[in-house]
Image (cartoon, grey):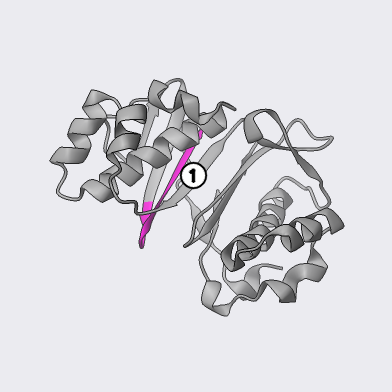
Amino acid sequence: MIYFFDDYENFSAENFLNFLPQNRREKFEKLRLKRDKENCVISYLLLKKALKNFGIENFEYEIGENGKPFLKGNENIFFNISHSASGVAVVADEKPVGIDVQDILDVKNGVIERCFSEIEKERIFSSAEPEKEFTRLWTLKESAVKCNCETVAFLKNYCFDSDEKTFEKYGKIFTTSERKNLFISVCGEKEFLEIIEIKTEELL
């Protein structure tokens, strides 16, 4: 399942710092922007909730190849984190998984030329809401790259022409959801249809 948080109006990062390990607090202190600091705290607490489903109470994670995070000393559980200005999403599974959350983006022609196929370009520019279609496709590509531990250079290798909420392609199952002003897409070995909304008082 996906854990999702967007309750920023009731959230104060300083109230939760004591529940973070030392290395996470150090990262928090190095960040400059308020939203980045908030997401640093929220993403850790959401991950803690997600890992409880696998009986994991205490954990450390590191950043591996191409920026993909992994649990230190536990190779059987995979997770991924994504955040934007409007929300944080976390997913965990027993198989490799990638997630991307993105606020609705303006259509960027330069990005389209570098990262999108002709089929995808047609979908975007023929859409009644091109910004939404651009963002939806972007999150699908990002989720695939993150699941497969690749870099953004591989984004153009993935082409999506389906508008279904869940579908199979490239040997993976993709799930995408629109929530308020953002999209969440997941790439993994199964469907991720359930989104658990976490409010500030539920973070601990």
Q: Residue at x 73, y 61 (%)?
A: 28
| Residue occupying the point 64% across, 70% down | 202
Left or right relative to 49: residue 163: left
The answer, for residue 189, to whether it is visible in the render is no
Hey, which quadrant is residue 150 in on the image? top right
Q: Which SS type dominates the magenta stretch?
A: strand
Dot 1 corresponds to which residue? 100
* Element type at mark 1: strand
Of the pair 74 and 110, the residue shown nearer to us = 110
Quadrant position of residue 157: top left
29 left or right, relative to 86: right
In this picture, which residue range is highlighted in magenta?
178-188
Decide which of 74, 25 is in the foreground and name it.
25
Residue 60: horizontal and vertical position, in percent?
Answer: 81, 46
Q: Could you tell me if residue 72 is visible in this image? A: yes
- Pointer 1 local density, CA inside 10 Å: few below 14, some 14–19, many at least 20: many
